[in-house]
Image: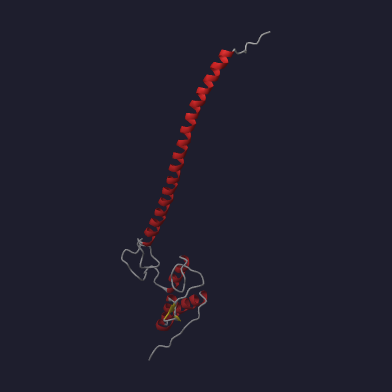
Amino acid sequence: MSSDRSITTPELNEAMELLASDDAAISAVLKAVKELNKSVQLISSRLHYLQTAMDTVLDRTDVVLTRTAPKSNCIFCTVEENRDSHHSCMKYADLVSRTVQALRLNLCLKCLKPSHGGDCQFVIFNKPHLTPIQRQAVFIVNELNIAPIQHQAVFIVNELNIEPIFFKPSP
């Protein structure tokens, strides 16, 4: 039995020549692919640099926008609610409502700024000073002498764990 897969010498030589020419073509394609790979890596590194630079610019833009955003003069009102630029809010005119609103807004009850924990160093002339809420409580208790407001002031003094300060009216 003879095999149909037998190859004669001339066919083998022809196949070897085709293989050699295919090697040259494959080598050329491989060389081109290597060059393309280098170009893609270069473009990729430049793209990564540009993305990092863009992220930095966006972060800095956000900081600038935050710092230059309109701010309300009133700590209890938003910018939209404070179109008249008032400093003392009429929505929370009495001491109790201001204190409750300050607690809701998570404001420091000593300096009325966004809460910063127990490390508030609210001082004037290098000495601890009455807080805005304490000053208002002292004024209410000493000047107005109205029983319901005194009870509110005492409630607030107790709630805030502050020492009540009473001034005698000057003669």
Q: Residue furthest left?
A: 84
- The foreground one among 98 and 71 is 71
Image location of residue 38, percent across then percent down: 46, 39
Tag count: 0
Left/right of residue 73 with respect to residue 13 in the rendered view: left
- The foreground one among 37 and 170 is 37
Image location of residue 148, percent across then percent down: 45, 77
Q: Identify whether 52 is placed above or below 9.
A: below
Could you say which quadrant of the image residue 81 lies in?
Answer: bottom left
Could you say which quadrant of the image residue 56 lies in?
Answer: bottom left
Who's the residue at 52% across and 19% down the image?
17
- The foreground one among 131 and 30 is 30
Q: Identify whether 12 is placed above or below 101.
A: above
Q: Identify whether 47 is placed above or below 82.
A: above
Image location of residue 62, percent across then percent down: 40, 56
Left/right of residue 89 with respect to residue 108 in the rendered view: left
Q: Look at the image and tell me in which quarter the N terminus lies.
A: top right
Q: Look at the image and tell me in which quarter the C terminus lies.
A: bottom left
- The foreground one among 76 and 113 is 113
Image location of residue 140, percent across then percent down: 42, 80
Q: Identify whether 157 is placed above or below 55.
A: below
Q: Residue furthest top?
A: 1
Who's the residue at 46% across and 41% down the image?
41
